[in-house]
């Protein structure tokens, strides 16, 4: 019975993730990843409230990430990682305080962290420690107009995180009140968008990886690095390295994300954790 419920909820999470994600990206909504993580937290809070099991959110998220691996197009590895990790963090909060409102709130607060951690790790990998020098240089340039320090940036991110957690807490209250019928309506709406998305033609992974590099945050980070190199009068060899490193690593990373052998990953999970594959089979029926 639990396997069936996990499968249904994982399918619902995956369908809404694709539908809502398509809508947000179609309208170029900034910080779309944070909206999607809040959506996942909302569904996990609703499912945990219904099933009353601390491991519910973890099982749903891992099953949904496996379902994402079977998607015929689009990026898979980074969404799979985000879905799985956010589910683990939410589950940790519920395990600590129980499958009740306070536990759901702690789980939501922990889940909200990953939306800041994953991009930070990725961009640090792409640009290296030099990105910190770029940020410091830009802050020095704006000091005559606004005295900014790293402490100010930390405060900014703390405020952004607190705002996200506040939105998540409100969603926890909604999740405990919303009916199954309304959630099914939400799923039907997302399915319509998902079907439209699947009809659109996607290019080869090599072209899509190049398009990923047109992400505004990647372009902005690269442009800031270019400005730093020009005004800091860096040596030619260092300038070339600082500018070409993120381009080369970025393209390889975005390409590997799309070429990752997800079918082998699914087989590995089936061998190590067969119970998740049962949930996946159930989710496929509803997908």
Image: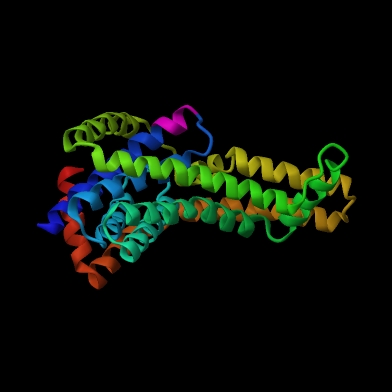
Which residue corresponds to the image point at 43% horizontal and 47% vertical from the top-left? 75
Q: Considering depth in this image, is 98 or 121 the residue closer to the camera? A: 98
Task: From the top left corner, tell me how far across and down residue 174 is, in percent.
Answer: 31, 38
Magenta stretch: give its range.
Answer: 23-27
Evaluate whether residue 74 shows in this view: no
The quadrant holding residue 169 is top left
Left or right: where 284 falls relative to 235 = left
Marks counted in the figure total: 0
Left or right: where 242 falls relative to 114 = right
The quadrant holding residue 146 is top right
Q: Is residue 31 above or below residue 150?
A: above
Direction left: furthest residue: 1
Task: From the top left corner, tell me how far across and down residue 201 is, in percent.
Answer: 38, 33
**Main secondary structure of the magenta stretch:** helix
Which residue corresponds to the image point at 33% horizontal and 57% vertical from the top-left? 103
Which residue corresponds to the image point at 59% horizontal and 52% vertical from the top-left? 250
Q: Is residue 176 above or below residue 48?
A: above
- Give yes or no for residue 26 being in the magenta stretch: yes
Q: Considering depth in this image, is 237 or 132 the residue closer to the camera? A: 132
């Amino acid at each position: 019975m639990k396997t069936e419920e996990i499968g249904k909820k994982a399918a619902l999470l995956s369908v809404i993730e694709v539908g809502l994600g398509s809508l947000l990206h179609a309208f170029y909504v900034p910080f779309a990843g944070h909206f999607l993580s809040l959506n996942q937290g909302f569904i996990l809070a609703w499912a945990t409230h219904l099933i009353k099991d601390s491991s519910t959110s973890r099982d749903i998220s891992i099953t949904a990430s496996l379902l994402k691996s079977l998607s015929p197009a689009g990026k898979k590895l980074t969404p799979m990682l985000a879905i799985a990790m956010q589910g683990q963090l939410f589950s940790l909060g519920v395990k600590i305080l129980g499958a009740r409102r306070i536990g759901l709130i702690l789980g939501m607060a922990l889940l909200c962290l990953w939306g800041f951690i994953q991009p930070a790790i990725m961009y640090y990998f792409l640009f290296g420690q030099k990105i910190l020098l770029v940020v410091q240089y830009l802050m020095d340039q704006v000091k005559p107009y606004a005295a900014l320090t790293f402490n100010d940036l930390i405060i900014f991110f703390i405020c952004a995180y607190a705002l996200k957690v506040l939105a998540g807490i409100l969603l926890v209250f909604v999740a405990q009140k919303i009916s199954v019928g309304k959630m099914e309506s939400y799923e039907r709406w997302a399915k319509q968008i998902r079907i439209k998305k699947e009809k659109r033609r996607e290019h080869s992974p090599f072209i899509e990886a190049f398009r990923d590099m047109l992400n505004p945050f990647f372009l902005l980070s690269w442009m800031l690095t270019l400005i730093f190199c020009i005004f800091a009068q860096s040596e030619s060899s260092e300038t070339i390295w600082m500018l070409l490193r993120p381009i080369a690593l970025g393209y390889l990373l975005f390409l590997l994300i799309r070429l990752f052998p997800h079918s082998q990953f699914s087989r590995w999970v089936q061998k190590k954790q067969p119970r998740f594959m049962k949930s996946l089979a159930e989710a496929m029926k509803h997908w």
